[in-house]
Amino acid sequence: MGLQRRLWLCFLGVSFLPVIYIIYLNLEITWRMDILNLTQFPGIWYTQEPNRLHDPEEPLVVNTLSDNSSIAPPTPLSLKVKSTSPARVRPSTEPGARTTKGSDLKGALLKSAKPTEPPFIGDSYYSEDAPPQTDCPDSIRSRVSQTDFGVRYLGRIPVLQWAKHATPEQYQRLRLYPGTHGWANLDFNTLVSTLSVLNTSANWHMFDDWDRRSNGSRCVRCAVVGNGGILNESKKGHEIDQHDYVFRTNGAVIKGFEQDVGSRTSFYTFSTNTLRNSMRSYAGAGYRGPPLSEETRYVFLPDHDRDYLLMKAGATHTPVERGPERSKTPPTYFGGNVTVEKLKMYHPDFIRYIRNRFFRAHAMQTKYKDIYRPSTGAVMLLAAIHTCDQVSAYGFMTPDYVKYSDHYFDHQYHPVGFFINHDMRMEMTLWQQLHRAGLITLYMRQ
């Protein structure tokens, strides 16, 4: 009887071995999948908290990486990659137009059936033979090839878009990219009706009045002014105003802060969204809208059809046709007498180019890739680097940013916020690199 019981127990034990093995395999597969999910976003955690303060660009997701994190800001990559998706699109056959591409990556990529880059990258751009507006012997263009930035810098990429670019060929190419990086959020009729208005030389020359104001100078000197708290009590206003041109962006409050930030505005960079949000968020600090002066030009950063609609309405002094800014009367943001020559718009190829080659951030590997872009201030500063001969940057984030409030016009201290739609630490790292390379002069207190 005892022998039978032992034999029966052995039989049951052997019978349960396959069941135990199957359970083990399931647990192992689940564990491995969890590991894969966690490693998709190494070192970074995101939470969907609403934006309660900071930039008026309406970031949707807060980057909760602490200021004391041991993870260093990602260094911008020197990209030489070819996007397989845009390469299928025939480039424009207009005279003088070419497509600029990166070179192929080899090695491990040859073993993969996947494309070398996701389709949304599109490291392929319109190229123009546009001569520089000056012959400055010490321009950024002449010096950049001697620095590490020479392999990234494209001197022939159009910074501004205008009537010439509104062709069916270019629309088919750029409709692949959403937001600021292309025309995916824009129908062709709206594109043509807006860009056809931008048909003067002033719309594609950044410095359309340089011939009249150069005073014999061979070099264009630009001050690019951000809104960072480092400018508070800086006493840099007079120095800023001594430049040939002064760039500003978003909630640029001037009245009462002239001693620190200057009083002139030559170029005001904004999107319709950031403009409206600045007027709402910074009204208490005295911001009422874009600076209004004879000197001021208004440079749209287009990320939606709203920007094209407002641009057309402003240029033609007609009501905004549709959308959140729809109106019964012409918009007054730019003054009642604004002319089309004072309106400009960044080219989506330029925005995508600086994202791809200067701001390749972790967010581009996540589901938030479509809302990620360089900050408006970063676009403004890179545009100056591609058009001015000499650039001085003020009010941009520096490594000691925790000492200063978010904005120079804050009534009380507000810490700088970090959000998934921009990578401010990467931008800060780039400003330091450009300063060390001698391509810009960055204002720092330390």
Image (cartoon, rainbow, N blue to C red):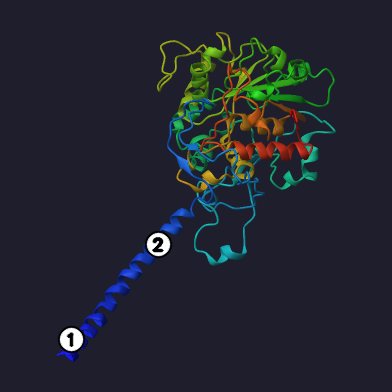
Of residues 339 and 440, the one drawn nearer to the viewer in this rendering = 440
Residue type at the position of mark 1: Arg
| Residue at x 72% of width, y 13% of height | 259
| Residue at x 40% of width, y 21% of height | 322
Label 1 SS = helix
Check disc 2: other Cα within 10 Å, few if <14, some if 14-19, many if 20+. Answer: few
Badge nearest the viewer, 2 or 1: 1
Q: Is residue 351 left or right of residue 62?
A: right
Q: Is 260 situated above or below 33?
A: above
| Rendering coords of residue 359 (x, y %) | 61, 41
Mark number, residue 5: 1
Q: Can residue 53 be seen here? A: yes
CA distance for labels 2 and 1: 39 Å
**Residue that sits furthest to the top in the current view:** 336
Label 2 SS = helix
Mark number, residue 276: none
Q: Is 29 situated above or below 343?
A: below
| Rendering coords of residue 87 (x, y %) | 55, 51
The C terminus - image quarter: top right
| Residue at x 59% of width, y 22% of height | 413
Q: Is 121 situated above or below 418?
A: below
Q: Can residue 334 be seen here? A: no
Question: Mark 2 vs mark 1: which is more N-terminal?
Answer: 1
| Residue at x 69% of width, y 22% of height | 231
In the rendered image, which residue does mark 2 sit on? 31
Q: Are marks 2 and 1 in contact (CB under 8 Å)?
A: no
Residue type at the position of mark 2: Trp
Q: Is residue 51 left or right of residue 6?
A: right
